[in-house]
Amino acid sequence: MHDHLGGLITDLKILIDKVFKKKSLQVNQITKIKNLVQNVNSSFKEKIIHIMDFTGFSEDFLGNLHAIILRRYVNAERRVTFDYCEEVNKILTSGNLFYIQNNLYLVIQEIVTNDLKYGTGLSAWKISRHKGDIRISLNSRTKALKKQDGAGFGKWSVRNKLLKINGKINQRTINGEFRTILTLPC
């Protein structure tokens, strides 16, 4: 947060200093100042929301995850459902599980990003217990072509983060229907 906001504020200060040296203000400079102030404001709000999201994980992990996912889909003007089992929420919220919560959050963020890029229509998320494990599934329509089981950076990152928390992922696309299933041991 410090580096990003600090950089924007420094750019703003340099621009304002230039304006004061010339003792005149041109329209393009006003526009640049306005845009930089809007960027600082947006960045600051985004960082505060991010901090608040993480703070809430220890009290209500899936409730906060739901809010994050909903915000992303609404911003992208996509429909989403998010159904979860309170028993799973208690498991993921109990004790000191920051490492698991953080990795799971990052995995889900990557999957949401890909769904927003390639998916269409309704995205249905479901989090439940299945054979003693935690199961997180996403079903959506996709406009992406079925690819080989290659590993782009996003796919590698997801698998790596899941390995850290003993999780597994299964993804498939059939007839334009994309399905992801994450499995975590309890």
Image: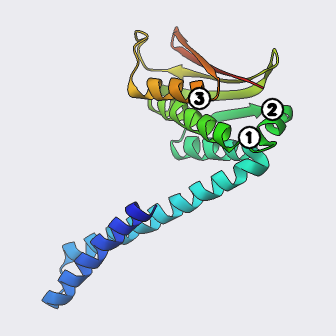
Mark 2 = which residue? 88
Residue ID at (59%, 34%)? 108
Q: Position of residue 11 (x, y in %)?
A: 28, 70
Q: Position of residue 145 (x, y in %)?
A: 41, 14
Give the structural element (helix, strand or loop) at label 3: helix
**In the image, what residue type sits under mark 3?**
Lys
* Of pointers 2 and 1, the one earlier in the residue sequence: 1
133 left or right, relative to 179: right
Against 31, residue 50 (above or below) is above
How far separated are the C-alphas under marks 2 and 3?
19 Å
Residue ID at (61%, 28%)? 123
Is residue 157 in view?
yes
* Of pointers 2 and 3, the one earlier in the residue sequence: 2
* Crowdedness near tag 3: few (<14), some (14–19) or many (≥20) residues, C-alpha within 10 Å: few
How far separated are the C-alphas under marks 3 and 1?
20 Å
Give the structural element (helix, strand or loop) at label 2: helix
Mark 1 = which residue? 62
Question: Which quadrant of the structure image shows residue 151?
Answer: top left
- The colour scheme applied to this rendered structure is rainbow
Instruction: Look at the numbered discs 2 and 1 and tell me whether their residues touch, using CB distance below 8 Å.
Output: yes
Q: Position of residue 97 (x, y in %)?
A: 72, 41
Is residue 25 in view?
no
